[in-house]
């Protein structure tokens, strides 16, 4: 599974963990996160995230 980092605030979305408190179950791929989802820390959209090299 991959991780995606917010370019604005540094928040990391981890596909393995999801964001259950925000309605995104563990194991949810980035492509399956709703297009209108916003960073829970700073409010920017998915376009402001990029994949983190592990």
Image: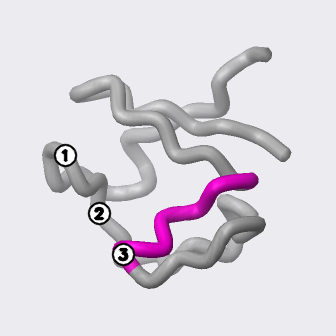
Q: Is residue 29 left or right of residue 50?
A: right
Give the extent of the magenta segment: 16-22
**Taking 26 as reference, is 50 above or below it?**
above
Residue in the foreground of this view, choosing between 36 and 1 = 1
| Dot 2: element | loop
Name which quarter of the figure residue 48 lies in.
top left
In percent of width and height, residue 22 lies at: 36, 75
Helix, strand or loop at mark 1 = loop
In the picture, the disc for residue 41 is 1
- Residue 4, horizontal then vertical, whole percent: 58, 38
Name the image quarter holding the C terminus: top right
Q: Is residue 17 magenta?
A: yes
Q: State the CA–CA distance, disc 1 to disc 2.
A: 9 Å
Q: Residue at x 32, y 57 (%)?
A: 45
1 or 3: tag closer to the N-terminus:
3
- Label located before the other in sequence (2 or 3): 3
Q: Is residue 2 left or right of residue 14?
A: right
Nearer the observer: mark 2 or 3; the answer is: 3
In this rendering, the answer to whether 12 lies above or below 28 is: above
- Judging depth in this view, the residue of 22 and 50 nearest the camera is 22
């Amino acid at each position: 599974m991959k991780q995606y980092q917010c370019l604005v605030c540094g928040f990391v979305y981890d596909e393995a963990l999801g964001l259950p408190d925000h309605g995104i179950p563990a194991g949810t791929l980035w492509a399956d996160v709703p297009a209108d989802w916003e960073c829970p820390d700073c409010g920017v959209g998915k376009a402001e995230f990029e994949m983190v090299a592990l």
